[in-house]
Image (tube, rainbow, N blue to C red):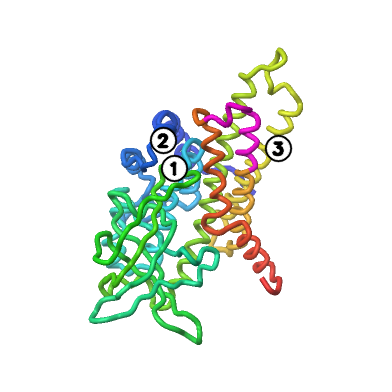
Amino acid sequence: MDFDLADEQHDFVRSLRSFVDDVIRPRAEAWDESHELPLEAVEQMASLGLFGLPFPERYGGSGADFLTLCLAIEEIARVDSSLAITLEAAVSLGAMPIYLFGTEEQKSRWLPPLAAGEALAGFGLTEPGGGSDAGATRTSARLADGHWLINGSKSFITNSGTAITSFVTVTAVTGTRDGDKEISAFIVPTGTAGFQVGKDYRKMGWWHSDTHELSFSDCRVPEDHLLGSKGEGFRNFLRILDDGRIAIAALAVGLAQGCLDESLRYASDRTAFGRPIGSFQGLQFKLADMAMKVELARGAYYRASWLKQQGRPYRKEACMAKLFASESAVDVARDAVQIHGGYGYIEEFPVCRHFRDSKILEIGEGTSEIMRVLIARELGLTGS
């Protein structure tokens, strides 16, 4: 078994790390204080080809594998989770539904600007009354005179309100099938009449990522803006989440690695009782546990990525990676604050921001509780 990255992946990570440390790290705190997505950073990330990594060259991508995308997300999350989730959501949630389920005409129209990082897209699944119960969709769509009329709302939608957001994909009930809701997906371009973007949320973390509630009131989109087959929207969006969970695991590993790096540096520099605090066994044990969690979480998302790339079933492993990595990130971030003591509670120290940013990882793209339900279901347990 070969656990090493390919040479080109090593080269990619080294190159991206220089960009992250030289360009993103010095500005991350100021960007966070602004509470706005820095589009100049998005442009710089786009110039590196990050938004087109997993897409074929004919759509403006570079044809890299899914693990390479995850490596990019991990590297950025070491210093800036808001930009990491911007990239993750832009590719895994924004562009991937078009690539996987769109017609050739839809791919040719919508994918190239997304792959180039010239545009962003949102993924509208969650609703105010339906988070974990994603099938409780109340947004509706009906066909009239060659257009779909969409009514309803979506919540917590990343990359949905930026100056370069070109569209959102949304699920909506289009009828019933075998007594259940028939849920389809649609492409809704920015600026469509009846489509409104609410104010950015005041969030605990991810301060400079873009997150909005969306509302649709007789929002008219052409009939050919149906994404995928009618009635397959919910199933297709759940497939998107399988991949997204691996990517969130990578983000969690990056955040945890950043916390570990900062803690090791602080434990070497900070002295107490006449010696570095890293020489005390209590902190050594804590740092050893932090390092163990980072490495095990990294191995989990590597394996889930490998299974996906081999064309083998990977839903269980994706859920396991997301669950373990997100909970580990919260643990490691909390321990990093503790190691820093009072300074860990001060915004000027990165671990304070990492701690705020970590909690959402146990919630977004499937809560820890839902991950356990899905793992139990994959194990064949009844009632799950």
Circle 1/circle 2 CB separation < 8 Å: yes
Q: Is residue 324 magenta?
A: no
Determine the main secondary structure of the stretch shown in magenta. helix
The residue shown at (44%, 79%) is 182
Identify the secondary structure beneath mark 2.
helix
Q: Which residue is mark 1?
A: 207
Q: Residue lying at the far top in this picture: please name it.
A: 274
Mark 3 vs mark 1: give the one in front.
1
Nearer-the-camera pick, 297 or 59: 297
What residue is pinned by disc 2? 33
Span shown in magenta: 331-346
The residue most toward the bottom is 178
Q: Secondary structure at mark 1?
A: loop
Q: Is residue 7 above or below residue 199?
A: above
Q: Residues within 10 Å of mark 1 (few under 14, many from 20)?
A: many
Query: Measured along the vertical axis of the image, is residue 226 above or below residue 253?
Result: below
Task: Identify residue type, mark 3.
Answer: Asp
Task: Identify which amino acid the numbered label 1 is placed on.
Answer: Trp
Percent position (x, y) of residue 213? 39, 58
Q: Which class describes the residues within 10 Å of circle 3: few (<14), some (14-19), or many (20+)?
A: some
The disc, 3 or 1, on the residue closer to the chain's N-terminal end is 1
| Marks 3 and 1, how far apart at CA | 29 Å
Query: What residue is shown with label 3?
Result: 289
Q: Earlier in the sequence, mark 1 or mark 2?
A: 2
Badge 3 element: helix
Q: Residue at x 50, y 45 (%)?
A: 204
